Image (spheres, helix red, strand yellow):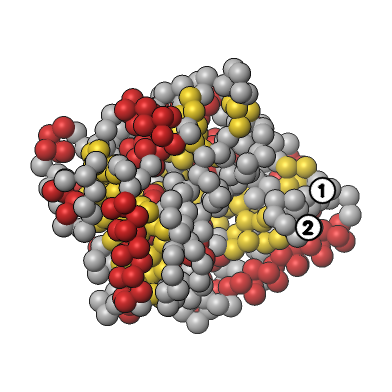
Amino acid sequence: MSTILTNYGVTGEAVYRNLSVAKLYEFAIRDEGAQLAANGALVALSGEKTGRCPKDKRIVDEPASSPHIWWGDVNRPLPETSFAMLRGEALALLNESSRLYVVDCFAAWEPQHRIKVRVICTRAYHALFMHNMVIRPTDAEMAEFGEPDWIILNAGTAGVGSAIPGVTSATSIPINFKSREVIILGTEYAGEMKKGIFTVLNYILPKNNVMPMHCSANEGADGDTALFFGLSGTGKTTLSADPRRRLIGDDEHGWSENGVFCFEGGCYAKTVDLSPEKEPEIYGAIRFGSVLENVVMDPETREVDYKNISITENTRASYPIEFIQNAKIPCVGGHPKNIVFLTCDAFGVLPPVARLTSAQAMYHFISGYTAKVAGTEQGVKEPQATFSACFGAAFMVWHPTRYAELLKAKIEQHNARVWLVNTGWSGGPYGVGKRFALKHTRAIIDAILDGTLDRATFASDATFGLAIPSACPNVPANLLNPKSTWADAVAYDKSIAHLADLFRANFNKFADKASAEVISGGPR
């Protein structure tokens, strides 16, 4: 029996700790039905759940942390007694498993804000995923690792087996800030582990005046750091993977008094329609050691068909950040000069780029807008606005205004520019207009980062008050003013007025804790 696990109540005999990539491949292929792709990646299936289950996340309601929690739909309370019951069910599965995998790792590249994490799981695929996504200790660091700060008990191969107060389905992902544990039951989707750690850091770091951020980050040749906030599908990972800039990280970061630092040691990229032409850096990173989730392969050649979404639209690739050729390791950067808020506006009314005032930056940060398009979900017939506070509400623990205050202070202290970039539609809504070409969005990002766009002439739109540039290199001028791209100006006015109303209605739930300045950053 492994003595490193007995303190947690885990009594399994066959424990494999910090295995090599090759050994994890062997176990996953032999015992879990995983397959080897032609490009060398391990192809695994996550079972019934092919995405996160945010409605099943729970925060344990205990005296020390409860006063700080943003309780509601995002953070639902769980009694301590119920957590004990869920922990018992997780231990029962782990102790009955024929083998267990342990991954010891770090989260956060800045040493003074780093936490030690121990992952205990039943699938080799999950262990390999976490090996990729976390910061891997050196041999010397592993020898002195000792006891972790946080534990993840991943018993996702079994669902919740009994009625437990506060639990509403067979899936449950409770987080306990008192015992410093994350438990996973009823889902084998690997992303729940990494997002569990992210949620933990979203609670811990603001206490130390560090801004946790759901964003990607990269650095130019002159050391200029840029941040890219955005929800899934807006281009956060794609746009930060730039061969001319060094990648700091693609998803989770902190901003401290020293600058920006990544929380992770890997990337988790969407792979729908992936190609070497459109996203060469990501395409080239998928090789031996990478994990491909829920993709479809040719049964003979084992070539991956990235266009095939018969299992899920949320096909993913996990790989260590060093698989990106121009990754910056250690994954840290200076204070950002430019911050980009990415949105995919399926209504087709927002400009491809706009410069934001401080008040607008806070308003749009708290709003966290993008849009769903018809066909992506059952019953969605036309574009639907989606608002996710701080561009990642599912992982925010404090009230969103707390994160907005931190961000405002950092922006003002370091004189960072904030931009709104729309990667969605132009000339009409989804189904009528066309989506902005990736080459045009990249040209906009280039003009932001090299300072060209900041020197442009701007005009303010009548509804949102956004400062829209009159010109941008390598972008057709007619695309910059969204109204001019619509054949029906009256229809445009109605559509943008409708979107403004949706913004106002969403922001009402934050208005009681938002300052008058922030509220003034919304639609006129």
Task: Give the residue at x 33% y 25%.
Answer: 22
- Circles 2, 1 touching at the beta carbon (< 8 Å): yes
- 450 w.r.t. 415: above or below: above
The amino acid on which the numbered mark 1 sits, given as a three-letter code, is Gly
Q: Disc 2 marks which residue? A: 382
In the current view of this chain or complex, which residue is farthest to the top?
301
Disc 1 is placed on an element classified as loop
Q: Quadrant of the C terminus?
A: bottom right
Q: Amino acid at mark 2?
A: Glu
Q: Is residue 24 above or below residue 380?
A: above
The percent coordinates of residue 437 (x first, y second) are 69, 36
**Residue 134 in view, yes or no:** no
Q: Residues within 10 Å of mark 2 (few under 14, many from 20)?
A: some
- Determine the residue located farthest toward the bottom in the rendered image: 512
Which residue is the extreme one toward the left?
Answer: 144
Q: Residue at 60% of width from left, 69% of height from top?
A: 522
Q: Earlier in the sequence, mark 2 or mark 1?
A: 2
Badge 1 crowding class, 10 Å Cα cut-off, few under 14, some 14 to 19, many 20 or more, is: some
Residue 489 lies in quadrant: bottom right
Residue 125 visible to the viewer = yes
Q: In the visual, does 258 lie left or right of 382?
A: left
Q: Nearer the viewer, residue 297 or 245?
A: 297
Find numbered disc 2 in the image and state the secondary structure of the residue it sits on.
Answer: loop
Taking the image as shown, residue 300 lies to the left or right of residue 350, namely: left
| Residue 272 disc label | none
Counting labels gives 2
Q: Nearer the viewer, residue 373 or 14?
A: 14
Q: Position of residue 156 (x, y in %)?
A: 42, 53
Quadrant location of residue 59? Answer: bottom left
Q: Residue at left 41%, top 61%?
A: 173
Residue matched to label 1: 431
